[in-house]
Amino acid sequence: MRTQVAIVGAGPAGLLLSHLLHLRGIDSVVLERRSETYVQERVRAGLLEQGTTDLLREAGVGAGLDREGIVHEGLRLCFDRTMHRIPLTELTGKNVTVYGQQKVVRDLIAARRADGGAVHFEVDDVAVSGIEEDSPVLRATIDGRQVEIACDFVAGCDGFHGICRDRIPARHARTYEHTYPFGWLGILAEVAPSTDELIYAFHDNGFALHSLRSAEVSRLYLQVDPEEPIENWPDERIWSELQTRLGTDDGFALREGPIIDKSITPVRSFVAEPMQYGRLFLAGDAAHIVPPTGAKGLNLAVADVKVLAEAFDDWYARGHRQALDSYSDTCLRRVWRAQDFSYWMTSMLHRMPGDSGAQARMQLSRLRYVAESPAAARSLAENYVGYTPG
Ligand code: FAD
Ligand code: DHB
C-alpha cells in the first residue's frame, strides 16, 4: 500500500488533518488503535475557539456545529459566593462555542467516509520506520493482516500515550513536563444546564466548573485528589461538593440529575520540542498537553493541523519546503502561549495542597482584579477566545 501522508491516530487532530489534506488533493491513510464506537463515544473537550469553528465551517464540516453548537459571548467567575461576568465578545469581538469533541469526531468521520477516505479502526502494532530517510514506512496489523504502508510523510496524531513521539531520538528532543497535585473529575448529567454561560468557581474546597453539552445535558468538573479512586465519589458526594463550590448568595441554583458518565483525568503540562524530526510531524496531544482550565487542548490540536495541512500543500503544490521546516517553530509559539494561559487560569482557580492560606489570598486578589479591571479582563478574554501569536 502507498499513500502520501500516513496518519497515526483518529482523534480530532488525525481526522481533521486527513480531511484538510483531501480538500487539497493530498492522499492520506489514518490508522487508529481503538474501535470506531470507542472513538466516537469518548467524552472529552467541549469548548471551541472561534478560530476552530471558523476552520471547521470553511472546511465544509460545520453543519452539525450550525445545528447544535451553542455560541457563548461571556463566561462567569464564581468566588466570594458571587458570580462575576467576563464579557468575552464585548472585549474581543470574538465568541466561543460549546460543541462536544465527540460531535467534532463524529462529523469528521462522516466526512471522511462520504469522501471515500481511508480510516482504519482497531489497528494493532503500528510501527514507524524510515523517517530519517526520504522513504518512511508504517507497519501495522489491519483486520488481522500485516500491512506495510509506504509514504512521503508520517503525521503522529496519536495523543499523549501514542508511539510516534518516541521515534524522535532523545539527543534531538527535549521535553518539559509538570504534573499538578490534583486531578479533574468530570461528569455528564442528564439535567438542563443551570446556567447559560460557563461558570469557573474558586472555593476553599477546590475548583469547580459548570459547562454544558445541550439544552438537556450538563457537563461539570471538580478538582479532586488524583490518588483518590473514582469509587470514593458516589453521585451524592459529587452533587454535594458541586452544590458547595458553586454556592452563591445571589440566587444561583444548581439543578441535579442522573449522572451518565464520570471519570478522573490527571492535570498536567507537557511539551515535546521539536514537533518534527525527519519525515515525522507530531500534532495535537502527541506533542503537548495543557491543563484543561483554559480549554485549549482540542483547539491547539486543530491549530497544529491547520499549519501542517498548509505546509504539506506548499510542498506538494509548489515544491516549497519552507513551511514544513518552520512547522515546529510556528506551532510552538501558540503552544507556549496556551501553556502560560492555562497555567495562569489553573493557578488562579485551584486550591493548592499544602497552602498556608497566603496562596489562596493572592488567588482571590487576582480574581477580584480580573473582575474589576477592564485591562485584566481583556487579557483573560483575549487568551480564552484564542490568541494567535504574531
Ligand atoms: P486524541 O484525542 O488523544 O487522539 C489520539 C488518537 O490516537 C486516539 O484515538 C488514540 O486511540 C490513538 N492512538 C494512540 N496510540 C495509537 C497507536 N499506537 N496506534 C494507533 N492509534 C493510536 N480541549 C479543549 O480544547 N477544550 C476543552 O474544553 C477541553 N476539555 C477537556 C476536558 C477533559 C476532561 C479532557 C481529558 C481533555 C480536554 N481537552 C479540552 C483536551 C482535548 O480533549 C485533547 O487535547 C484532544 O483530544 C487532542 O486531540 P488529539 O487528536 O491530539 O488526541
Ligand atoms: C469544558 C472543558 C474545559 O476544560 C473548559 O475549560 C471548559 C469547558 C467542557 O468540557 O465543556
Image (cartoon, rainbow, N blue to C red):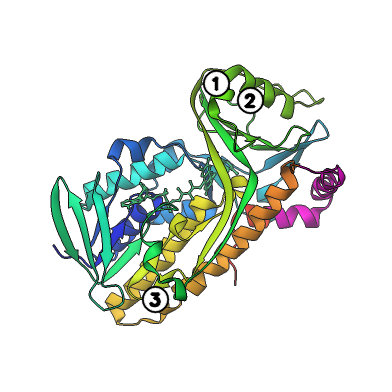
Decide: is 349 above or below 326.
above
- How far from the left and from the top, in percent, is residue 64? 39, 40
What's drawn in magenta, residue-wise?
A: 354-380
Find residue 324 and name its label.
3
Q: Secondary structure at mark 1?
A: loop
Q: Quadrant of residue 360?
A: top right
Q: Does 378 appear above or below 241?
A: below
Question: Is residue 354 rendered to the left or right of residue 114?
Answer: right
Residue 38 placement: quadrant? top left
Residue that badge 1 annotates? 191
Q: Position of residue 76 (x, y in %)?
A: 71, 39
Give the quadrant of ligand 2: top right
The prevailing secondary structure element of the residues shown in magenta is helix
How far across and how far down the image is residue 142, in percent? 18, 49
Circle 2: element type = loop
Left/right of residue 203 with respect to residue 173 in the rendered view: right
Task: Inspect this view and state whether residue 246 appears.
Answer: no
Q: Which residue is mark 2?
A: 194
